[in-house]
Image (cartoon, grey):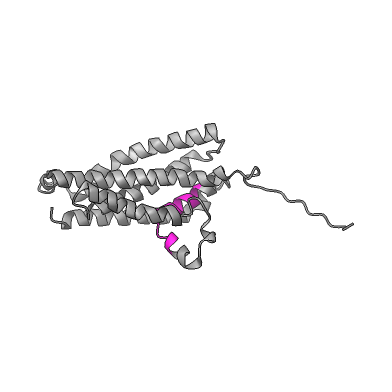
Amino acid sequence: MSPWGVKASILYNPDLKFIHFVMPGIVGLILQLFTVTLTACSISRERESGTLTQLQVTPIHKSAIIIGKVLPYLGIALCVEAMLFFLGQQHFHVECNNPILLFGLSFVFLLSTSGLGAFVSSFSRTQTQAIQYSVFFLLPVFLLSGAFAPIAQLPLGVQIFSYAFPLTYFCHACREINLYGGGITRVIWDLVLLSLSALLTCSIAAYRLRAVEV
């Protein structure tokens, strides 16, 4: 008989339920689909009906137009997220730790995805084109963002592309908060990168809206 004994102890997710890992990915995908598609279709509908031309000749700054299109869907998306986490907690017993930090993370993530939707709309002349462009972007995000499987399981060459998507950082930060009980120090870089992504997408969308001839 060996004098040494080994006892394994699972610190996080001791029941080994897959739903605890996949819940942030499900929420992030729903929020991204909601904000990117609806924001892109909203601005494209204004262009298709001709009202965007009327807005562009007014003294309203182009950034204000983008903000006006982004904020309503952002508010609705936050309500949808709260509902999703409530259902996850009630039916799947997925804990929602540090809701204030999670709300801040979600707000920055939704700013980034809403700006991305506005950016997609700048290339779309019709709502149909906006939907097609949105789906074209969302399909690789579904597979490469780590929403349903760890990024480390992907080939090394493919992992590089995974870090170009905001959902990658949202999923990582959300798991750090809910699954591992992490605080602001564990997700600070995810918040910084998501903030940079939000600033970049919204700025480019505002520039494109000013530069594109309607």
Query: Whole-percent x and y of residue 29?
Result: 42, 46
* Residue located farthest toward the bottom when viewing the structure as drawn: 157
Question: Is residue 85 one of those drawn in magenta?
Answer: no
* Residue located farthest toward the top when viewing the structure as drawn: 90
Query: Whole-percent x and y of residue 73?
Result: 31, 40
Q: Residue at x 43, y 41 (%)?
A: 103
In the displayed structure image, the side of residue 148 where residue 132 appears, left or right:
left
Whether residue 183 is visible: no
Q: Looking at the image, which is closer to me, 39 or 101? A: 39
- Quadrant containing the N terminus is bottom right
Q: What's the magenta bit mostly, secondary-structure-wise?
A: helix
- Number of labelled discs? 0
Whether residue 201 is visible: yes
Query: Whole-percent x and y of residue 128?
Result: 23, 48
Magenta highlight range: 161-174
Residue 177 lies, with reference to residue 165, above or below; the image says above
Q: Residue at x 78, y 54 (%)?
A: 6
Query: Whole-percent x and y of residue 42?
Result: 23, 43
* Residue located farthest toward the right when viewing the structure as drawn: 1
Tell me which corner region of the image, top left, top right, bottom left or bottom right, holds residue 144. Answer: bottom left
In the displayed structure image, the side of residue 64 where residue 155 appears, left or right:
right
Q: Residue at x 17, y 55 (%)?
A: 210
